[in-house]
Amino acid sequence: MTAGERKDKGTKKRTWKVGELAKATGTSVRTLHWYDEIGLLSPSDHSRAGYRLYGEGDVARLQQILSLRQLGLSLDEIRDLLARPDVSPLSIVRMHITRLQEQMELTRKLLGRLEGLASWLAANERVSADELLKTIEVMNMYEKYYTKEQLAELEARRQAFGEEAMQAVQAEWPVLIAKVRAEMEKGTPPEDPAVQALAGRWAELIEMFTGGNPGIRKSLENLYKNEPGFAAQQGYDPALYDYVNRAQAARKGGAKS
């Protein structure tokens, strides 16, 4: 019998300890403990030793919670919504699908407008104010990924650093991305010292932007993952994302040894 399979009155059922569930879903143990504390997701059982044991129904509820979080709902709103008899797992999945479809459509619109601007600018043609206004409207997608509190925190950090420092950081990003891409295309292993140095600076710039706020970092990751058109503008793609992640993992592993 595996750690995740236990017997209950002769019927085998699958359960997860909090650490097992955290590892399987990419959710932190701290978050699961918090959900339990506020009554949003409590384990359906406990072991004789007192360990939390989550069942398949708990996993289903966690999926619903995380879907609703990605839709921008607060934990209080999620608790109220899940308590409603007219809200089913299927309706939540459909809500999530609708939001992703909206995001995909937004990406297509932004890509089309930016391609049009690029064509006009390449031909040295004047871009009308109306076209710029429409492009700006689409670019406001940031508000889809960051909460008002996160945007306020980002603005406070920008003011604290000063405009000159922020511009210097923004100018450094494309240079850093180009250097990382060059190493990737040369086939340099992520563990190579040169790549490790670039990964270190990458982590520093992310830290400067997020201030160590895990919520802002997650919003940033969702923006780049769900808006491939925007990511491509920055010279960022899935292959580069994977390469940087492997370099960061190697850095963490080296720090532990």
Image (cartoon, helix red, strand yellow):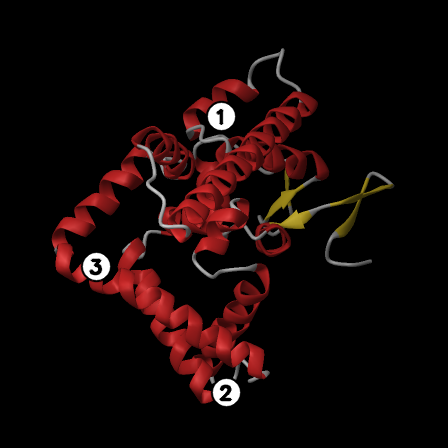
Label 2 crowding class (10 Å Cα cut-off): few <14, some 14-19, many 20+? Answer: few
Query: Looking at the image, is mark 1 or mark 2 nearer the viewer?
Result: 2
Report the Cα–Cα distance between label 3 and label 2.
30 Å
Asked if labels 2 and 1 touch by Cβ distance under 8 angstroms, the answer is no
Q: Residues within 10 Å of mark 1 (few under 14, many from 20)?
A: some
The percent coordinates of residue 215 (x first, y second) are 38, 46
Q: Tag 3's secondary structure?
A: helix
Q: Residues within 10 Å of mark 3 (few under 14, many from 20)?
A: few
> Residue 42: in sight, yes or no?
no
Q: Residue at x 45, y 80 (%)?
A: 256
Residue 137 locus on image (x, y percent):
37, 31
Residue shown at 31% from the left, 65% from the top = 205
Q: Which residue bears the numbered disc 1?
A: 78
Residue found farthest to the top: 86
Residue named by callout 2? 192
Q: Secondary structure at mark 2?
A: loop
For mark 3, what is the residue? 167
Q: Which one is closest to the eye, mark 3 or mark 2?
A: 3
